[in-house]
Amino acid sequence: MIHSELVVTVGAAHAAILVAAITAWQKLGGRSDPAHRLMDSAEPVLRALRSKVADELADYLKANLSGVAIVPNLILEGTASYTEKQPELLAGEKYRESIRDFVEEHSRVLVDVRSLVLWRQSWGRASRALSWGIIACAVWSAIVAAALWFVDRPDLFTFPDLLVKIASTPTAFVIAWCLVCLVIIQRNHDRVSSICEQYAETAT
């Protein structure tokens, strides 16, 4: 391939990538796409689950600790005097057993709450990484296309063929980066969607 054909091919490829990056940014940059709507709708589910766990824990502790007798402890002071010290209910064995039993009985819901929080955070990080990847891809593609079409001229300046070929390496890396981010986003999207569907009635 002669130099002029190489320049036209690489320049056209980066121009097409630039257009694709701008289109992707317009679609993924806003908060109107289905993925953003799902993540926004997950917030009421998360609040409902937290409220549900808190209410059930309060009822569980009330039922288990309401009949616990609190016997004051006698504390020796000095040589001949005693004083009563009210024991702390929250430090008692019955309280710890109640908490342990509640966690074991509601482990599924607690795990789902934790998973929903972690997967939303992972989705957010991957979404931001994808956004910056698209921006980097657009900027680099614009630089390469402009340099090859407006700077590389026989009467002005000619880039070495090797440099023209190497210019596609960062482009390929950024595209691969964006694809990895898309996989992570889709994976977390499916996980969050599954939990939201499972607890949809809780949030209503």
Image: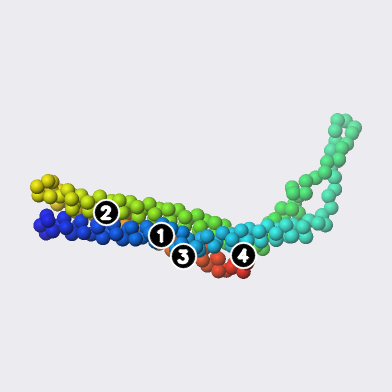
Residue at the disc numbered 2: 141
Instruction: Pinpoint residue 53: horizontal percent, then vertical percent.
Output: 66, 59
Residue at image x 85%, y 45%? 72
Type of the residue with mark 1: Leu
Circle 4 residues within 10 Å: few <14, some 14–19, many ≥20: some
Colour pattern of the rendering: rainbow
Q: Nearer the viewer, residue 56 or 146?
A: 146
Q: Identity of the amino acid at label 2?
A: Ser
In this picture, is 72 found above or below 23?
A: above
Q: CA distance from mark 2 to mark 3?
A: 28 Å
- Counting residues from the N terminus, which is met first, the one under dot 3 or under dot 4? 3
Q: Which residue is identified by label 3?
A: 34
Secondary structure under badge 1? helix
Helix, strand or loop for disc 3 = helix
Q: Residues within 10 Å of mark 2 (few under 14, many from 20)?
A: many
**Residue type, numbered disc 3:** Pro
Q: For the residue labelled by badge 2, is the local secondary structure a helix, a strand or a loop?
A: helix
Locate residue 77, reporting x and y percent.
85, 33
- Dividing the picture into quadrants, the one containing residue 112 is bottom right
Disc 3 vs disc 4: Cβ atoms closer than 8 Å?
no
Residue placed under numbered mark 1 in the picture: 28
Mark 3 vs mark 1: which is more N-terminal? 1
What is the spatial separation of the Cα atoms under label 3 and label 4, in whole angstroms?
19 Å
State how far apart marks 1 and 2 are (Cα): 19 Å
- Disc 4 vs disc 1: Cβ atoms closer than 8 Å? no
> Mark 4 = which residue?
203
Where is the C terminus found, in terms of image quarters?
bottom right
Residue 76: image x %, image y %? Answer: 85, 35
- The Cα–Cα distance between marks 3 and 1, rounded to whole angstroms, is 10 Å
Q: Decide if residue 163 is on the left or right side of residue 34.
A: left
